[in-house]
Amino acid sequence: MLVIDLEKNASRLARRGHPWLYKDDLKAADLVDPVFSPGTIVRVRDHEGRDLGLACASIRSKIALRLCGSWPGDGVPSLDEFLANRIGRAISLREGLIGERTGVRLVYGEADQIPGLVVDRYDDVLVLQATTALIDASLPLVASILGELIETRMILARNDLSIRRLERLPQEVVLLAGEPVERVSILEHGVTHLVRPYAGQKTGMYLDQRPARKRVQELASGARVLDLFSYQGAFSMAALSGGAASATMVDQSISALELGLETARENGFSEPELIQGNAFDVVRDLRNRAHQYDLVILDPPAFCKNRREVEGGIRGYRDLNRASLRLLAPEGRLLTCSCSHHLKPEMFENVIRQSALDLPFRVIVEDRFGSGEDHPVLVRVPETEYLKVRQLRRWD
Ligand code: SAH
């Protein structure tokens, strides 16, 4: 059986609850076993011999051990048993969220104790992402477990994400089961969204913003809405369904904007205005032209993808938030978001504070929230709370 006995330091790290142990945290002797390439499941014990549950071990990655929860007895399950158990648990956590034409994240990596695996469900289409060598090598198994549990038309691996390079995995898109499906439609808060599993960003849609889209729908009645970094306009559609007077989508991707237009037509909404360009320039231009909005959504991509980018990222967030606040009509609202893991909630609050300095009106924090229940936040793993949404209001 594969057991790793941690030394005192590594035990302390693991006991704190963080699921990752880096190579440097471990004894070199623990890592030479060739069986660990590309990865395997091991049992981990602390320096006093106490059980810490299972871990996915890999010598290819800087992160040598990813702890993935308890398992009965003192043995190690087969990969098949492990994946079937964890995927089953992940799906049962989301049972209440699954309905007609569902868009839901079924599996979310460490939060579901399956490090390296993301599974997004779009109606009867599943789109996967594998970011560890172990999961990458197990994708046929993952697909067959999922296929047993859910009736699917297609299971696709969107493994064209750059983080895979860290484990020397290729950039590829692989059809794992079924027939190619270029487009699928899902229903969210009564709105139809078009999802392109092959051509869309990430797995096709940003499912983590479901709670924020609900909020936008509730706040939108009669509002002039500006949707910055709109992608295919999921927020604009929520706003139009909630009775927005107008919606303006801003994104650099023309194909995303065009899909927004098509989605609006599909839903029978009035057409959103499309602005293709760099959002940093667009907000300046809108202000120069004295435009005002009752509801601005600011949902940029992660500006701080690693620690080195934090300083520049903070500047970017500050400038955009400041410009967005300046575009608010009296009593208007800004829904501002950050999805950077490396920008902690208190750092984001600080950015917002700085962006509101010297404005000729008060800014009130009306609400704070994050991703939906299908992106579980682990109390002991602060990084799982990566999505931060703040609802601000101009109140003169
Ligand atoms: N709000 C969207 C998700 C936004 S993802 C939703 O709820 O679905 C970030 C988007 O920002 C992507 O669509 C990307 O094309 C766009 N983007 C990135 N940098 C940009 C920039 N400088 N100017 C305009 N759009 C940008």
Image: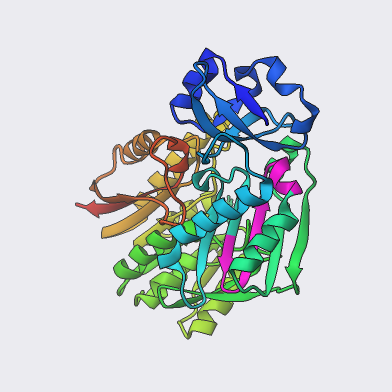
The image position of residue 169, as x and y in percent, is: 77, 43
Magenta stretch?
A: 120-137
Is residue 313 toward the left or the right of residue 131 in the image? left
Q: Residue furthest left?
A: 396
Up the image or down, 345 lies above or below 101; here it is above
Q: Quadrant of ligand 1?
A: bottom right
Q: Quadrant of residue 94?
A: bottom left
Q: Quadrant of residue 345?
A: top left
The image position of residue 369, as x and y in percent, is: 34, 51
Residue at image position (33%, 63%) is 215
Residue at image position (73%, 50%) is 138
Quick one: 282 or 158, which is closer to the camera?
A: 158
Residue at image position (39%, 50%) is 370
- Residue 222 visible somewhere in the drawing: yes
Q: Quadrant of residue 302?
A: top right
The image position of residue 303, as x and y in percent, is: 54, 41
The image position of residue 114, as x and y in percent, is: 58, 46
Quick one: 247 or 286, which is closer to the camera?
A: 247
Up the image or down, 142 lies above or below 135; here it is below
The N terminus lies in quadrant: top right
